[in-house]
Image (cartoon, rainbow, N blue to C red):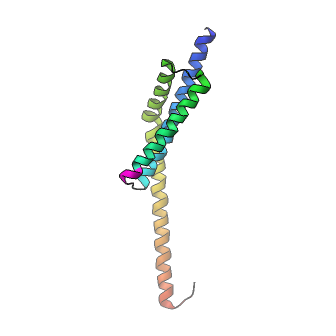
């Protein structure tokens, strides 16, 4: 295999990896939106932040690995990485994080509720905590 083809193949896989990282970055916002309800304005701000971050990352990847040239194999690599992560790993990782968050939230609610009930009983009995 010629060195030029080998370098393009390496760049393809590197950009696929960075495409996966882009979706991982977007998953942060997805999870944040699921956990905390957002207004339309905050959603727009988050989308702008994601767009700026993604643009900077893509620029840095193009500059670092392909001397700033936009080539089809670079865009295809990034697209393949995005699709692979978004359809393969993302549903499981987001689901797992949301599941763990719900469990922690319910445990904290129970603990807070039990603590509040104990404090109310102690207050009725005249005990100091």
Observer able to see residue 55:
yes
Of the pair 20 and 73, the residue shown nearer to us: 73
Of the pair 16 and 49, the residue shown nearer to us: 49
Which quadrant holds residue 62? top right
Observer able to see residue 95:
no
In this view, the residue farthest toward the left is 40
Q: Residue at x 46, y 67 (%)?
A: 109
Image quarter of the N terminus:
top right
The stretch in magenta equals 38-42
* Position of residue 125 measured from the top left corner of the image (x, y, whole percent): 50, 90
In this view, the residue farthest toward the bottom is 126
Question: Residue 18, relative to residue 112: is it above or below?
Answer: above
In this view, the residue farthest toward the top is 2
Q: Is residue 50 magenta?
A: no
Q: Residue at x 50, y 69 (%)?
A: 111
Which quadrant holds residue 14? top right
């Amino acid at each position: 295999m010629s060195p030029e083809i080998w370098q393009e193949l390496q760049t393809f896989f590197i950009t696929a990896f960075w495409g996966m990282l882009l979706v991982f970055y977007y998953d942060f916002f997805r999870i944040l939106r699921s956990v905390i309800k957002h207004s339309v304005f905050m959603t727009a701000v988050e989308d702008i932040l994601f767009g700026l971050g993604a643009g900077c990352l893509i620029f840095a990847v193009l500059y670092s690995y392909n001397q700033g040239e936009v080539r089809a194999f670079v865009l295809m690599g990034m697209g393949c990485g995005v699709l692979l992560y978004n359809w393969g790993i993302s549903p499981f990782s987001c689901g797992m994080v949301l599941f763990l968050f719900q469990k922690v939230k319910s445990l904290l609610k129970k603990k807070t509720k039990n603590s509040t009930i104990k404090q109310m009983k102690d207050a009725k009995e005249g005990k100091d905590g």
